[in-house]
Amino acid sequence: MPNVRHVLRAVSGAFVVLGIGMAITAVAWPSIAEDLDLPIADLGILTLMYGAGYTTATLSSGWIAERLRSGHAFIAGAGAAGLGCLLGAGAPSWYLLLVAMPVFGFGAGTFDAAANSYVAVRGSQREMGTIHGLFGVGAIIGPLLVTGLLTIGLSWRVSFLTVGLLFVGAAVTMAVVANDAAIPTKKSTGATGRLRVTSPFVWSLLTFFFYSGIAATTGVWAFTYLTEQRGIDPGFGGLIVASYWAAFAASRFLLGTVSERMEQRRTLRYAMILTVVGYFAFWLSPWPVASVLALIVAGFAHGPFFPIELLETRERFGTVRAPAVIGYQIGGVNIGGAIIPAGVGLLVSVWDLTVVPPVLALFAVLTFGATEKLNTTQPPATVERPVS
């Protein structure tokens, strides 16, 4: 059995790469479209192909966990993500790029689900908060990487090549450090019984689906709303959105720092109440400065949702079933992240950008309500501690 601390450190580093990888395509897209002579609207198709691979991997994570050690899933996921990036970097045509993206997405999704399951079972609130905070750091680095390379005159392909090599490096690191990493499975423990569609399971998926309405809608529409509807300068608007994501990442790091003094469910309750208040203030405040600050506060407030709920999954469903449930939860986030912002786009086309803040406030309320319902549907019974 490998040293769990070493594995967790390797996973933490790989989560920075995962965040970078998820952030590069949208920023590189104008250059990709120009290079391959594509319409700008085709970004939706490219995103869909990536998301299809990612969601397939996360929904299959329970099946994968029963057949591959965590370490082998880490290696396969990081390796496939690297292969997808490298194929994208060298793609001479649109059609080959469409082949590369689901490979990229499947690899990233495989690594994401396996890593979250491993940390949920063998880590603590500190490690879970840290890896998701580092993912946020990667999401900030990604756009800077692409824009920096383009600024000095290099092709968008260099950004995909760079990220591909980083994923390959992560796969090699996992092979050295985490090859034998594993978590309990039905096969290894002799447990029987299949994952059933119970009320707690359904509410758990709904919490993640509703949460995607907050995070994905903010990520897709906040900049456009601020610049087009509120009349904020694009440069300042970009700074505001960057501040939102910085606050989002900071709260996850804070969760890891003060985890020993915080009870998970109580922390999440207060965080989601502050999220609701923040988004309502963003919607209703007549003062631009207060509205902007409210958006940043909301980002800070809902940052801990993902790591806390994944740890709660271990406690609600047990260490053996947790990987399968976590895969479905991440799948719910991916599905919601695809369809909810698209639905907001339809609302914008019917009305205007003023629909964005009330939609965010609505999903903040739905997420808070679903987490509270989940807690009453399945209160903590036997709390399983990290397995070392």
Image (tube, rainbow, N blue to C red):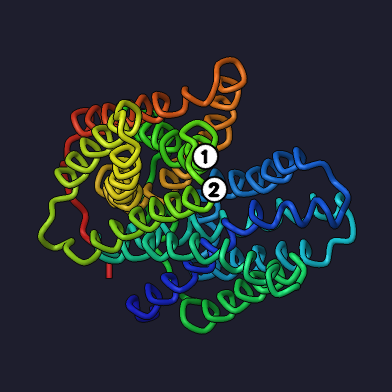
Whether label 2 touches label 1, CB < 8 Å: yes
Q: Is residue 385 above or below residue 213?
A: below
Q: Is residue 252 left or right of residue 45?
A: left
Q: CA distance from mark 2 to mark 1?
A: 6 Å
Q: Which residue type carries mark 2? A: Pro
Q: Which residue type carries mark 1? A: Thr
Q: What is the residue that sits farthest to the left in this orientation? A: 261
Q: Which mark is residue 227?
A: 1
Q: Is residue 124 left or right of residue 356?
A: left
Label 1: which secondary element: helix
- Residue drawn 77% across and 68% down? 155
Q: Residue 273 falls in which quadrant of the image? A: top left
Q: Badge 1 local density, few (<14 within 10 Å), some, or many (20+)?
A: some
Label 2: which secondary element: helix
Picture coordinates of residue 281 (x, y %)?
Answer: 28, 32
Q: Which mark is residue 242?
A: none
Disc 2 target residue: 234
